[in-house]
Amino acid sequence: MSVIVCSYGEIHLKGANRGFFLRALMKNIRQVLPKEVKAEVTDTRVVVTEYTDSKPIVAQLKKVFGLTGIRVCEAVNFQSPEDILNYLKTIKINGTFKVVINRADKNFPLKSPVFAPQCGDVILKQNPQAKVDVQTPDTVVQIEIRHNGVAYVSTGIERGLGGLPVGVSGRAVCLISGGIDSPVAAFLAMKRGLAVDFVHFTTPPYTSELALQKVVSLCRQVNFFGNSGKLYVVPFTEIGSQIQKKCHDEYTITLMRRFMVALAEKIGIEHEANCIITGENLAQVASQTIQGITSNNFVVKQLPILRPLICFDKDEIIHIAKQIGTYQISILPYEDCCTVFVPSHPTIKPNLATVKAEEQKLNFDELVENCYQKIECKDCQSNHE
Ligand code: ATP
Ligand code: MG
């Protein structure tokens, strides 16, 4: 019988809390699988059965955080090692191979260094053109001998996403622009178990419906990885205009970011988030000096700001963006919310006292409150296909 056997890496290390992590993992797995497909935890593996075609099922499992390896296996019921050797006679191997035995059942009569060469011999007999190469084999024949008299035999492995199941670390609101960085930041936050909602600031009529659609597409693409975050769209034109009109233009970006973070915190608190995520990255642009970035920290009252990309290089961020399918969307050339208000020379090292003095020229709380009333929530579910 064909089964898909998944390993779940880091969750193994969770002592008394393992059950909590596994329940979350299984809930997330079942969400992406068709109803008729069965998935259960058996003997430290997630075993998926009752499918007709393994390919689409493996593709779904590859987007579940928490899984590290996914193998399509033959489940061989055995009473003695001969039963496994008999099955190996049916395996076709081209090129080089090695046999790896994982002997979870310590009562299995043969130890791995004894059983592996026996398996290799059977395979070589059936495939005279094949060769053993233990260093860099083309194919790894993996034989997992489990406790319940079943051996899982596979000839290939797909890497899972790793990380932890979405939701186990709590909730976050992620400030998402149309750029490359913030969708990657959301993805990495999800990787460590945060369920992420999105907050996007628009400045109509300077930003278009198409620019917003691009952000919806980005959220859908991030949601593809087992997240069901909502997108909160915040009309920011009034705040941006007030800052531009009343404050020193060197401080426009700093002040805008502070308003953004304050609004994100308000949204987060209402929706029971535990933290705020941004795509900020140290020294990437003039506004992201350590002083520029941290001036936001003094606005939030309850929720910490996490910045998953803080120490990444841009090419590392782009690499992930390409892998997760957001890059091609991010580079579509639509206007950004801030561009219209951005001065030619933003301050590189905003001084907190000056920031606060500039902010005093505005009615911060009232602007936030008025803006908050106009927030719209958009659906951006991935259809998990
Ligand atoms: P990104 O590529 O994500 O746009 P960036 O390098 O262009 O990032 P900035 O434009 O300076 O950087 O923005 C820094 C961070 O501020 C973004 O990563 C995002 O978290 C947040 N941000 C910027 N603009 C917006 C916006 N219009 N709506 C929501 N968040 C925003
Ligand atoms: Mg940007």
Image (cartoon, helix red, strand yellow):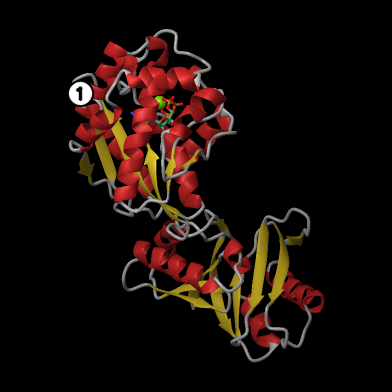
Tell me which residue sits at (53%, 17%) in the image. Answer: 349
Tell me which residue sits at (27%, 46%) in the image. Answer: 380
Q: Residues within 10 Å of mark 1 (few under 14, many from 20)?
A: few
Residue 289 percent location from the top left of the image: 54, 22
**In the structure shown, which secondary structural element does the residue marked by tag 1 occupy?**
loop
Q: Quadrant of ligand 2?
A: top left
Residue 5 percent location from the top left of the image: 53, 70
Q: Is residue 220 visible?
A: no
- In-front residue for pair 344/98: 344
Residue 153 percent location from the top left of the image: 61, 73
- In-front residue for pair 2/213: 213
- In-front residue for pair 33/16: 16
On screen, 75 above or below 100? below
Residue under label 1, please give it. Answer: 204
Left or right: 240 as drawn, with respect to 164: left
Res. 23 image quadrant: bottom left
